[in-house]
């Protein structure tokens, strides 16, 4: 089972390196969206908004990346292969989502401190921002995997994906942005971080099963 | 007992049963809603802080309760449909969504009307209103997903998965929003709750909620009948119910 | 006659008055009534549309024979 997971992970990462342009798009999107806020609000107003801006931008770019999560596999038929293997599908999906997170969210997290400083986030909040993103973005990926599994292959799939996933992502947004904001104001953010961590465990334990059920429906 | 459930799940039996039950629920609901509406408007004493504006509670709070209750009913029906592959349960879940969305809309609209004299603004980022708004998005997503899949059986199963994911998330969203608003709320903001609720204020609220529940049962049954006829249009038993001739 | 009607309307206005909040309270109740009745009408229309559709299908099938 573990070896199957490793195989799926390796395959996805190899594919991602071959198509790195696809992985770079959400990253560029993240940078552009965070640039739009100072332009729209004007630099003096930016003050306390940095953590909110970063989290909304991260949420939107993870949504953008999700659209491609299963699309290629649906089109070339390798999704059927994955479903028909003897390995339990939820476990394979954990590997899939992990690979997706490594390719699409991890670069974003590495870039986030830079953008945070550009947005005037106090330096003492940087560690919390990183930790909150590390805990929050996998949750977004697991929730998003369910949405992607439900909408891949549908007409207007990407617009629908946003409608399905964004309301479910609200708790992550609330806790993530609050944790960062609390740290920026010199408060103790550990409560919000614990809540983020429990969301991660919940989505890690239930999300793959829901995504597997959704994939089976979509492949019928 | 087993026979009862088996019969209940058979479309022709359910169609007839729903046709008989729906008017009863409807009349009980009408009596309860009109009666508690009258009691709420004229019998209950005005609140000492909010005056007569607090009477909106009798339509706002039952709507908010129902919006959550209907989601739970929808998810339960979806789970039954998904696990035991009962088509009728899927028909019930599909019929719940527009009703739940309309209750959610009512809770939002009446909350906003109540908020105007209380807060001085039509919209305040209060915990209940905000989580009702997100609930409305959840209903919208469910209906949009159903709408974009043409095959009924596939739409049933896909939307059932979504409803189950949603029902796990509803309490998480609700409490995260409460947590969020407790950090943001200023001290002067009045919440949309009667501060000290007297018995004469509470009774109409409870009877109104029960009336809404009966109303939901009546309209749900009526909707499911339409849905069943549409889904079973190629079956033999539906012939006697056709509208022409 | 006119005086009676005038008096009646005054009474009614008195009874229906909700202090400063008359417009808010009645619009909330009115909206609720509107949505509740609307749901009933929609459910009925759906049912009768399904029945009409059935009838047309049956007629078409008999026409084929």
Image (cartoon, coloured by chain):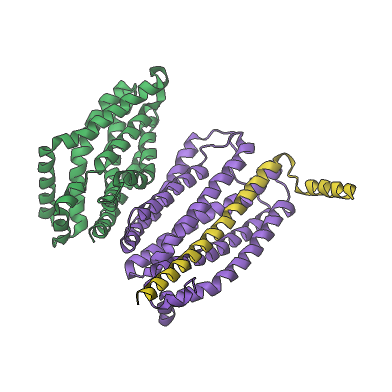
Chain colours: A green, B purple, C yellow
Q: Left or right of B210: which side holds B6?
A: left
Residue A62 visible here: yes
- Provide residue C43's location: percent of width, then percent of height: 51, 61
x then y, percent, for residue A161: 32, 46
Question: At x 10% / y 46%, what residue is drawn?
Answer: A10
Q: On the image, which quarter does residue B81 sit in? A: bottom left
Residue A101 percent across, percent down from the top left: 21, 42
Q: Nearer the viewer, residue B189 or B152?
A: B152
> Is residue A201 at all visible to an observer of this figure?
no
Closer to us: A80 or A30: A80
Give the total number of marks visible in the rendering.
Answer: 0
> Residue drawn at (64%, 63%), measured in percent from left and top?
B30
Residue at (71% x, 56% y) in the render: B38
Say if A47 sits above or below B112 in the image.
above
Quarter of the rendering occupied by the N terminus of chain B: bottom left
Q: Where does the image place residue C37, in percent across and percent down from the top left?
A: 59, 57
Compared with B156, A153 (above or below) is: above
Given the current orientation, which residue lies at the most extreme top position?
A44
Against B179, residue B233 (above or below) is: below
Relative to residue A35, is residue B206 drawn left or right?
right
For residue A186, side relative to residue C9 (left or right): left
């Amino acid at each position: 089972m573990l070896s199957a997971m490793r195989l799926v992970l390796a395959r996805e990462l190899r594919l991602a390196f071959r198509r790195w342009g696809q992985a770079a798009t959400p990253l560029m999107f993240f940078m552009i969206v965070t640039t739009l806020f100072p332009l729209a609000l004007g630099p003096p107003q930016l003050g306390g908004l940095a953590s909110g801006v970063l989290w909304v931008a991260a949420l939107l770019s993870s949504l953008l990346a999700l659209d491609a999560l299963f699309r290629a596999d649906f089109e070339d038929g390798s999704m059927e292969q994955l479903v028909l293997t003897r390995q339990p599908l939820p476990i394979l999906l954990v590997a899939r989502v992990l690979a997706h997170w490594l390719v699409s969210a991890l670069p974003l997290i590495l870039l986030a401190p830079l953008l945070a400083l550009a947005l005037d986030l106090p330096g003492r909040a940087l560690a919390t921002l990183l930790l909150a993103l590390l805990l929050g973005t996998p949750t977004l990926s697991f929730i998003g995997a369910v949405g992607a599994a439900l909408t891949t292959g549908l007409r207007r799939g990407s617009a629908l994906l946003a409608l399905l996933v964004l309301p479910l992502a609200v708790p992550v947004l609330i806790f993530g942005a609050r944790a960062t904001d609390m740290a920026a104001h010199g408060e103790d953010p550990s409560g919000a971080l614990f809540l983020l961590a429990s969301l991660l465990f919940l989505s890690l334990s239930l999300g793959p099963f829901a995504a597997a059920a959704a994939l089976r429906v979509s492949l019928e | 007992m087993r026979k009862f459930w088996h019969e209940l799940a058979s479309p022709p039996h359910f169609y007839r049963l729903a046709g008989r039950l729906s008017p009863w629920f409807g009349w009980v609901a009408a009596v309860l809603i009109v009666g508690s509406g009258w009691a709420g408007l004229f019998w209950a004493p005005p609140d000492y802080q909010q005056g007569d504006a607090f009477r909106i509670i009798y339509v706002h709070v039952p709507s908010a309760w129902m919006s959550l209750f209907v989601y739970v009913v929808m998810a339960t029906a979806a789970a039954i449909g998904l696990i035991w592959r009962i088509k009728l349960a899927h028909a019930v879940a599909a019929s719940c969504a527009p009703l739940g969305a309309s209750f959610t809309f009512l809770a939002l609209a009446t909350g906003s009307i109540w908020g105007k004299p209380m807060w001085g603004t039509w919209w305040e980022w209060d915990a209940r209103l905000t989580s009702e708004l997100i609930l409305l998005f959840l209903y919208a997503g469910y209906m949009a997903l159903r709408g974009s899949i043409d095959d009924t059986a596939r739409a049933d199963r896909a939307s059932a998965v979504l409803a189950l994911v949603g029902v796990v998330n509803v309490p998480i969203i609700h409490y995260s929003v409460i947590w969020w608003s407790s950090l943001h709320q200023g001290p002067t903001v009045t919440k949309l709750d009667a501060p000290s609720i007297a018995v004469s204020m509470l009774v109409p609220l409870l009877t109104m909620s029960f009336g809404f529940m009966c109303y939901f049962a009546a309209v749900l049954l009526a909707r499911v009948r339409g849905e069943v006829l549409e889904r079973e249009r190629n079956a033999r038993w539906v012939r006697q119910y056709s509208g022409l001739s | 006659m006119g005086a009676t009607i005038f008096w009646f309307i005054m009474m009614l206005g008195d009874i229906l008055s909700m202090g400063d909040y008359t417009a808010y309270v009645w619009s909330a109740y009115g909206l609720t009534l509107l949505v509740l009745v609307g749901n009933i009408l929609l459910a009925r229309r759906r049912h009768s549309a399904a029945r009409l559709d059935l009838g047309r299908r049956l007629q078409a099938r008999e026409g084929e024979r």
